[in-house]
């Protein structure tokens, strides 16, 4: 027969046997006891602190949106006295489903699949006592929008004082529409002088018209005269979520 010292007690966990030694966990006193027998009258007790607190995990969530097709580098910090770099789980979720990766470090790089909306990221890691901690964050996903000049043709001529330039912007993947656009207009007169203008929309000079999964952008009210030449740069556009495309 076998019994622990009366000063230890049996506690709610009782005694377990691993084939060589008896193990006893006392949550009241926060101790773990191990008793190993080599002979009929031999005994040994070893005490150590008991950790029942889950590790604190801090995921370094990127502030900037993530662009589909680009590499994503994630890192996190684990605050725990008994963290042994045991394998944890990194879960990445997009609109197409969840991907789970086994990680034994505090950093990981990948190229997530394309998606819309946000990227869901969760890291779960254990300490040496099998207490698990986790942290979660969301990362905005961006997809470059397709742009084209619709009117007037590059290198063309116009004698209309109200000539506009029309661009078409499309997003066939997520159907997002631009919320803000920016242009640079350079006007060259016959004498060789130039004027540089910056136009942003929506505004009276830059009109945005929704066309399903496309948007027509009309650049108008350009103050040019006969004989002038125009150079137009479509600098950038932004979606409501802050995603930037540079055509």
Image: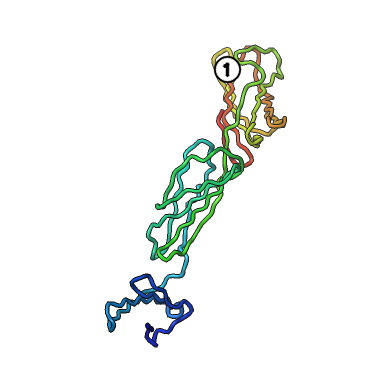
For disc 1, the marked residue is: 188
18 w.r.t. 190: above or below: below
Nearer the observer, 34 or 176: 34
The image quadrant of residue 246 is top right
Residue 122 in the image: x percent, y percent?
Answer: 52, 52
Which residue shows up at 69% across the image and 24% down it?
Answer: 221
Q: How many marks?
A: 1
Nearer the observer, 36 or 232: 36
Nearer the observer, 75 or 232: 75
153 w.r.t. 137: above or below: above
* Colour style of the rendered protein structure: rainbow
Residue 63 in the image: x percent, y percent?
Answer: 52, 47
Q: Residues within 10 Å of mark 1 (few under 14, many from 20)?
A: some
Residue 28 in the image: x percent, y percent?
Answer: 46, 80
Local secondary structure at mark 1? strand
174 w.r.t. 21: above or below: above
Q: In which quadrant of the rendered image does the C terminus lie? A: top right
The image quadrant of residue 2 is bottom left
Which residue shows up at 57% across the image and 22% down it?
Answer: 186
32 w.r.t. 3: above or below: above
Residue 22 located left or right of residue 56: left
Residue 162 in the image: x percent, y percent?
Answer: 71, 19
Nearer the observer, 221 or 40: 40
């Amino acid at each position: 027969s076998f019994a622990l010292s009366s000063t230890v007690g049996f506690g709610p966990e009782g005694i377990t046997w691993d084939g060589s030694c008896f193990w006893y966990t006392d949550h009241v006193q926060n101790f773990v006891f191990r008793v190993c027998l080599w002979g009929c009258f031999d005994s040994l007790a070893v005490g150590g602190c008991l950790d029942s607190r889950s590790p604190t995990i801090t995921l370094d969530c990127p502030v900037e949106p993530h662009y589909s097709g680009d590499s994503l580098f994630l890192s996190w910090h684990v605050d725990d006295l008994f963290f042994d770099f045991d394998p944890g789980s990194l879960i990445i979720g997009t609109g197409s489903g969840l991907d789970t990766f086994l990680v034994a470090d505090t950093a990981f790089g990948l190229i997530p699949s394309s998606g819309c909306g946000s990227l869901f990221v969760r890291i779960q890691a254990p300490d040496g006592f099998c207490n698990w901690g986790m942290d979660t964050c969301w990362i905005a996903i961006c997809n470059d929008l397709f742009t084209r000049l619709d009117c007037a043709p590059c290198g063309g001529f116009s004698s209309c004082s109200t000539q506009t330039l029309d661009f078409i912007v499309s997003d066939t993947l997520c159907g997002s529409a631009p919320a803000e656009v920016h242009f640079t207009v350079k006007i060259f007169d016959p004498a060789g002088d130039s004027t540089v203008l910056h136009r942003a929309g929506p505004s009276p000079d830059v009109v945005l018209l929704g066309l399903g999964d496309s948007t027509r952008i009309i650049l108008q009210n350009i103050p040019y005269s006969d004989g002038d030449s125009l150079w137009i740069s479509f600098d950038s556009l932004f979606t409501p979520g802050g995603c930037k495309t540079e055509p």
